[in-house]
Amino acid sequence: MVPGIAEMAGWLRFDDWLRRVPTFVLAGEADPIIKVEDLRELYDQLRAPKRFASLRGAGHWHFNDNAEAGHETFRQMYLTSFPDDSFDTRALGVAMRPFAELCSEGHAADTQRALCLAHMDAHLKDSRAAELFLDDDLAQTFARRGIDLEVAPAVHTGYVAGVL
């Protein structure tokens, strides 16, 4: 829907990484700008170790500070023909559901903080507790807090030292 997104995807190369790069892709299921399907495709191309999760009801601005204000500001601009002749801004505004219909700002912030912190602790601090948290049933862990998170099975294997 938004021009340039496909072009940007071509900037990322997977054939020249000289070391293992543990990756966690966190998607917003309701993001009309960067589609969850495109992130799933990106995830498929990444080498292990890797993880993928999609926060249901999260849009493009959910992982920013003041998510609701940002979401509604851009939604209104798009709905009122935000000046960009390169794409149908009104259609994008329509695709951006009202924030009240999406997951809460707090749930998005909690999800992002927990997953990013655990991922960084597991791979930068070699924290066994963080690894165990990530390897546990994340969907159930978050569901207990009322957060609807879809989690793909982690892929830990596939990397051979010195071989990409």
Image (spheres, helix red, strand yellow):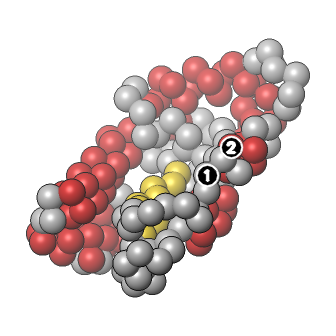
Q: Where is residue 131 in the image (x, y as percent from the top left)?
A: 21, 71
**Residue 90 located left or right of residue 154:** right
Q: In the rendered structure, which amino acid carries the disc numbered 2? A: Met
Query: 15 or 155, which is in the foreground?
Result: 15
Q: Position of residue 1 (x, y in %)?
A: 79, 43
Look at 69% across and 19% down and name the residue there.
Answer: 77
User: Height in image: 132 above or below 35?
Assistant: below
Query: 153 or 47, which is in the foreground?
Result: 47
Look at 33% across and 42% down and name the residue there.
Answer: 109
Whether residue 110 is visible here, answered yes or no, is no
User: Height in image: 26 above or below 76?
Assistant: below
Badge 2: how crowded within 10 Å, few (<14), some, or many (20+)? few
The image quadrant that residue 156 belongs to is bottom left
**Residue 7 located left or right of residue 128:** right
- Residue that label 1 marks: 12
Q: Position of residue 16 (x, y in %)?
A: 55, 61
> Do labels 1 and 2 touch, CB within 8 Å?
yes
State the SS at label 1: loop
State the SS at label 2: helix
Q: In the rendered structure, which amino acid carries the disc numbered 1? A: Leu
Q: Nearer the viewer, mark 1 or mark 2?
A: 1
User: Of the numbered discs in the image, which one, if any, rests on residue 40?
Assistant: none
Badge 1: how crowded within 10 Å, few (<14), some, or many (20+)? few
**Residue 30 located left or right of residue 105:** right
Whether residue 111 is visible here, answered yes or no, is yes
Residues at marks 1 and 2, CA–CA distance in whole angstroms:
7 Å
Look at 13% across and 65% down and name the residue there.
Answer: 127
- Residue that label 2 marks: 8
User: Height in image: 107 above or below 4?
Assistant: below
